[in-house]
Image (spheres, rainbow, N blue to C red):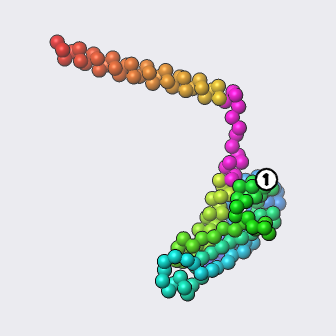
Amino acid sequence: MLRNTYSFVTKATRQIQLSAASSSVSFTGVIPTEKIEKRYTLSSGPGGQNVQKNATKVEIRFKVSEAEWLSDSLKNSIEEKLSHRINSAGELIIDSDRTRERHLNVADCFDKLRSAIYAIEKEQGKRQTTEKDEKILRERAAIATQHRLFEKRRTSEKKASRRAAVDL
């Protein structure tokens, strides 16, 4: 199982290196784990002897400027948006002590990193609304309002006709 996982990671890493070389614009979601430094420390919080004996807290760090698997525009956005997580050496630091298991905390760190990159990439790809777009949206809202009022009036008339029939 571990051998299969290792081969998958190395294949994915090669694919990322190839795509980075061709200056791909989007992030594929695969992070080359061998290029990211992992540190393990004693965790805080409840857990009894497990917390005092085992280093389960995980901290991952890498230099954003040297990450070949990220596009230049994404690197710039990461440095801007995650500046509070970047130290003076230019390393992005993400940590996790959510669980009592080291491997789950490693997975959580990489998930946090992947989610942050996806969020930044999604924000980068947003279209700027123009006057034409706003005009179309206003027209659609007006049509929706007219339709809603028409349906409301029709429902009211239907109920009024039922009341009139009962009064006889």
Q: Amino acid at mark 1?
A: Ser
Q: Magenta stretch?
A: 120-133
Any part of residue 15 in sight: no
35 vs 24: above or below: below
Tell me if residue 124 is in the magenta stretch. Answer: yes
- Residue at 52% in and 73% down: 99
Q: Within 10 angstroms of label 1, few (less than 14), some, or many (20 or more) residues?
A: few
**Closer-to-camera residue (84/56):** 84
Tell me if residue 164 is in the magenta stretch. Answer: no
Pick out the residue farthest to the left: 168
Which percent across, then down, holds residue 168?
Answer: 17, 12
Report whether 99 appears left or right of 22: left
**Closer-to-camera residue (130/71):** 130
96 vs 131: above or below: below
Per the image, the residue denoted by label 1 is 73
- Residue at 63% in and 59% down: 115
Which percent across, then down, holds residue 59?
Answer: 66, 73
Q: Secondary structure at mark 1?
A: helix
The quadrant where residue 52 appears: bottom right
143 vs 61: above or below: above
Any part of residue 75 in sight: yes
30 vs 141: above or below: below
